Image: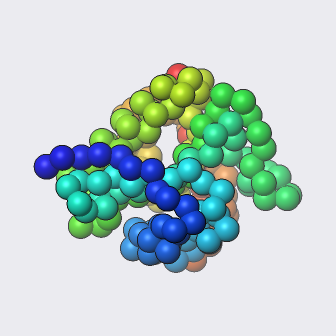
Amino acid sequence: MHTEFRRATVPQEIPSLIAFDHRVFPKGDWFSKADWETYISYWMMVGKIKVGCCAFQHHVDFQEDIRADGVNPALHGSLYISSTGILPRFQRMGFGALLKCWQITYARRRRFTRIVTNTRKHNVGMIRLNRKFGFQVVRVSPNYYTDPADATVVMELRL
């Protein structure tokens, strides 16, 4: 089947992005409408099926867990991957690796020098996938996630 990556049209597709988010992630990890409005989001399409989705912020670092205002600070050359998700019925079929490879290509083509992302400490599949592509753990911050409680693992890839 033909696979393509299509930019989500905001604000028209925000309801679809929210619905996708709810199907992939635990309740405490869902993004709000306002969050989706700040991200550059792409659908991973296999044929006509939205199999995956990812969201970015350009020139941003992930530091929410150490800044009181909750705003990620600017960092020129850094691409923050705020979300990477594959629908549960398509997981463990190689789509996550394909999406991660596309994300790295996206960053390189736009001349970013670094990619940063974070995930739940218990999401060993995503941590393993990121490591497979050369990401290194920057830090582990306890009590970042709620419902259920979990630490966040912040990872980066230098390009």
Q: Is residue 51 above or below residue 21?
A: above
Q: Nearer the viewer, residue 24 or 32?
A: 32
Task: Report the residue at 69% width, 41% height from top.
Answer: 60
Asked if one can make out residue 150 in the rendered structure from this viewpoint, the answer is no
Q: Quadrant of residue 28?
A: bottom right
Horizontal and vertical percent position of residue 38: 66, 57
Q: Nearer the viewer, residue 65 or 18?
A: 18
Q: Position of residue 139 (x, y in %)?
A: 64, 42
Q: Position of residue 31 (x, y in %)?
A: 58, 68
Residue drawn 58% across the image and 27% down it? 112
Q: Is residue 67 left or right of residue 136?
A: right
Q: Position of residue 66 (x, y in %)?
A: 79, 51
Please tell me which residue is depicted at 48% across the width and 26% down the height of the picture.
109
Spot the residue most to the left: 1
The extreme right residue here reads: 68
Say left or right for 52 vs 1.
right
Q: In the figure, is residue 73 to the left or right of 81?
A: right
Residue at position x 56%, y 23% in the image: 111
Q: Nearer the viewer, residue 74 or 41?
A: 41
Q: Is residue 44 visible?
A: yes
User: Can you say whether 100 is above or below 53 in the image?
Assistant: above
Instruction: Please say which color scheme the image uses.
Output: rainbow
**Is residue 140 toward the left or the right of residue 68 in the image?**
left
Front residue of this view, candidates 109 and 31 = 109
Q: Total of numbered circles in the picture?
A: 0
